[in-house]
Structure formats: C-alpha cells, structure tokens
Image (cartoon, helix red, strand yellow):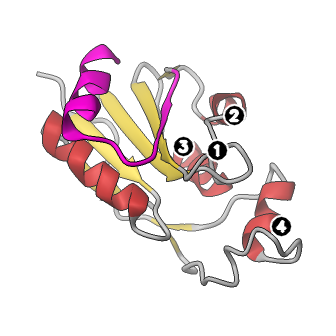
Amino acid sequence: MSKVLVAYFSCSGNTKELAEKISEIVNGDLYEIKPTSPYTSEDLDWTNSESRSSIEMNNKSFRPEIVDDLESINNYDTVYLGFPIWWYQAPTIINTFLEKYDFAEKKIVPFATSGSSGMGDTNKYLINSCPGANLVEGKRFGNVSLEKLKNWINNV
C-alpha cells in the first residue's frame, strides 16, 4: 500500500490551509517545511530588493536552512509538495527540502498558492534538486472548492 506525504512551506497560512485539505483528501501524513530562521514580514517584502526573500530568489543557489524533523522519506511513494509562488517559482527553501532527501522513484506533485501568479518556471528550478524523481506538472490555487481539489487530485 502506497503512503502519501503532504509537505509544505507556508508563511501566511494559505499554503498550510491548502496542505491540510489535501492531506485529508489523500489520507496523507502532513509535514511542515520550517526554516531555522522564520521569515518576518520585512523578509517577505518583494518590493524591497534588499529583503531576505528577494536576495534568496535572486540567487538560485541559495539554500535556506530548514528544521529537520522528518524521520525518513523512504516510507512514501507520493509526495504532494506545497509552497507559495515567489517570483513565478517555488521559494529556494523547497530546493533545500528536496536536496535533503532521496526522492528517486517517488512521485512529486507540486501545488502552490498565489493571488494571481502561475507556476511559471517552478519545475525547471526544482528538477535538479530531486534526481530520479517523477516530478509532475503542478498546479497553482487561489480559493478552491473541495470538489475541484478532489478532481485535481484524482487526475494527477
């Protein structure tokens, strides 16, 4: 029997709320990707080129440190991976998470939250962080009904 992990990074709570819904639908384990140094509202100010998030996203090799409390990825065949869209892609903390574990032969299903930005180049910047994984095309959500969410999950 396949086990499912729903891993997510959330600053404002939107991605967390979506991850909780997905976890309930797929009966998956929930795991929060937490930075060792939490982001402040100043860190997240995308209009400030000197903000932490702007600096991280302008340097694709930047890897924010994460709190590591996931025992093993070996128990999971499918990983739903959630994050907010930053600069039309996943925040680099998602690369940190992917590079910390061996996702070879696992299915990774990205999902994202954003007011209006799409997934952009997300998979292009994630694929090298999870060699051997089946990284499928993800989906960005705004407000979504449970029915539409279930539909998406059933078609992944």
Residue under pointer 3: 98
| Camera sees residue 70 | no
Question: What amino acid is labelled 2 in the image?
Answer: Gly
Circle 3: element type: helix
Q: Would you identify the image quadrant in which residue 120 lies?
A: top right
At 83% from the left and 67% from the top, the residue drawn is: 55
Is 155 magenta? The answer is yes
Q: In front of the other: label 4 or label 3?
A: 4
Residue under pointer 2: 120
The magenta-colored residue range is 137-156
Q: Residue 117 bears which disc, if any?
A: 1
Circle 2: element type: loop
Question: What amino acid is labelled 1 in the image?
Answer: Ser
Residue under pointer 4: 55
Q: Where is 119 relative to 43, above or below?
A: above
Q: Where is 77 relative to 57, above or below?
A: above
Instruction: Sort mark 3 into few (<14), some (14-19) or many (20+) by Cα contacts within 10 Å.
Output: some
Disc 1 to disc 4, C-alpha distance = 19 Å
Spot occupied by residue 40 in the image (x, y as percentages of width and height)? 60, 84
Disc 1 to disc 2, C-alpha distance = 8 Å
Question: What amino acid is labelled 4 in the image?
Answer: Ile
